[in-house]
Image (tube, helix red, strand yellow):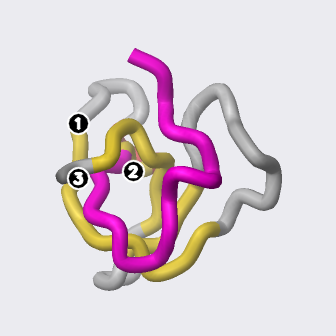
Amino acid sequence: MAVPSRSQITPGTSVNIVLKEDQRSGTLTQGVVERLLTKSPNHPHGIKVRLEDGQVGRVKEILE
């Protein structure tokens, strides 16, 4: 499964991210995007975002 590109993610999007401390385990954290932090159109590990609750991680999937 490919990670979403920057163009697919906007503030207000519900996503699953991997936090820095969860990278080894791959534990996903669900939240709503507040801000996109990655400037490039795509990233092999996922676009880095800040969630509305302040957590920062890389987007692994977009939720419907």
Give the camera-side residue of 27 and 9. 9
N-term-proximal mark, 2 vs 1: 2
Q: Percent x, y for residue 52?
A: 34, 83
Q: Percent x, y for residue 45?
A: 58, 31
Q: How many marks?
A: 3
What distance separates the C-alpha of mark 3 from that of mark 1? 7 Å
Q: Which mark is residue 29?
A: 3
Mark 3, Cα crowd under 10 Å, few <14 / some 14-19 / many 20+, is some
Q: Which residue is mark 2?
A: 19
Q: Amino acid at mark 1?
A: Thr
Which stretch did the figure color magenta? 1-17
Q: Amino acid at mark 2?
A: Leu
Q: Which residue is mark 1?
A: 27
- The residue sitting at 60% across, 42% down in the picture is 5
Q: Is residue 27 left or right of residue 60?
A: left
Q: Percent x, y for residue 22?
A: 34, 40
Tag 2, which secondary structure? strand
Quadrant for the N terminus, please: top left
- The residue sitting at 37% across, 44% down in the picture is 18
Whether 2 is among the magenta residues is yes
Q: Amino acid at mark 3?
A: Thr
Whether 37 is among the magenta residues is no
Q: Are marks 2 and 1 in contact (CB under 8 Å)?
A: yes
Mark 1, Cα crowd under 10 Å, few <14 / some 14-19 / many 20+, is few
